[in-house]
Amino acid sequence: MDARRNDIGGAADGRIGPPGRWPSFSDPRFRLFLRHWAERRVGLVVPRSAIDPAALKPCLPYVYLMRYDPAFDTFICTLSGELVNQAWGTTLMGKRPHDFMPASSAALANEIYRRIVLTPILHVGHRHSGSPDVPVKAAERLVAPLSDADGRPYGLFGLSVYHFDPIAEATYAPHVGSNFTEYFCADLPADLPPE
C-alpha cells in the first residue's frame, strides 16, 4: 500500500475507498450528482465550467460550491442551495467555514477540503452532531474536486442531504460522531458509475 493511503489527515474516523471502484449510494440524488461529475471529468477532475445545473435539478437545493483561496489557504462559498442554507440557519454565500462553523469544525473542514482539491479525492461522509452552537442534525455528503479552465485546482462541489429535528434543536445534545471514506481520483474507474 502506498504512503498516501496511510495519511488521511490524522482523522481516526476516515478510511480509504477501494481502488478501481466508485462509491455506491442508495439515494438517487447522490447517484445523479456522482454520475454528472464523472461524465464531465477532464483528467482526474471536472472543470468548474462543465457543471450543468439543469442536469442536476433534483440536487440543486442540496449543493454548494467552495472556491479555494490559496492566499489565505481557505475556502469561500460561491453557491449554496436553499436546504444547505436552511440546515446552517444562514446563507453560506460569500462565507468561509470559520464564518459559520465552530473553530474546531472549521479547521477540520479546511483540512478535508484541501485534501479534496489538492490530492484530488472524492469525499463521502456521514456526520451526526449537536452542541449549544450547532443544531442537532445528521448529514450525508459527497464532495468532489473542481478545476479551473486551465486545469488548476479551483475548489469543490458538494452535495449534502441534511436530516434534522427542529424540536430537538432546542436542547443540547453532545457530538455523536462521524465517518468518511475518501476515493483517490487517480484510482477511480475509467467507466461511469451506475445510474
Image (tube, grey):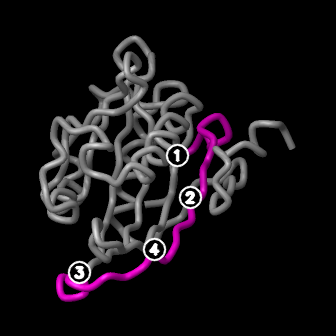
Give the alpha-carbon distance from disc 3 to disc 2, as whole Å: 31 Å
Amino acid of disc 2: Pro
Question: Which is more N-terminal, label 2 or label 3?
Answer: 2
Do labels 2 and 4 touch, CB within 8 Å? no
Q: Tag 4, which secondary structure?
A: loop
Give the CA distance from mark 2 to mark 4: 26 Å
Contact (Cβ within 8 Å) of mark 3 with mark 2? no
Name which of mark 3 and mark 4 comes first in the sequence: 3
Circle 4 is placed at which residue position?
Answer: 175
- Identify which residue is drawn at 48% across, 32% down: 117
Q: Residue at x 22, y 48 (%)?
A: 55
Callout 2: 10 Å neighbours few (<14), some, many (20+)?
some
Q: Residue furthest right?
A: 1
Q: Nearer the viewer, residue 77 or 46?
A: 77
Whichever of callouts 2 and 1 sits on the residue coming sooner in the sequence is 2
Q: Position of residue 16 (x, y in %)?
A: 69, 53
Residue visible at 59% across and 31% down? Answer: 119
Whole-Å distance between the Cαs marked 3 and 1?
Answer: 30 Å
Q: Which mark is residue 122?
A: 1
Mark in the foreground, 3 or 1: 3
Say whether residue 167 is left or right of residue 157: left
Earlier sequence position, callout 3 versus callout 1? 1
Alpha carbons under labels 3 and 4: distance apart: 13 Å
- Alpha carbon of mark 1 to alpha carbon of mark 4: how far? 25 Å
Q: Is residue 35 at all visible to an observer of this figure?
A: no
| 87 within the magenta span | no
Instruction: Indicate which label's residue lies in the foreground, 1 or 4.
Output: 4
Which label is found at residue 23?
2
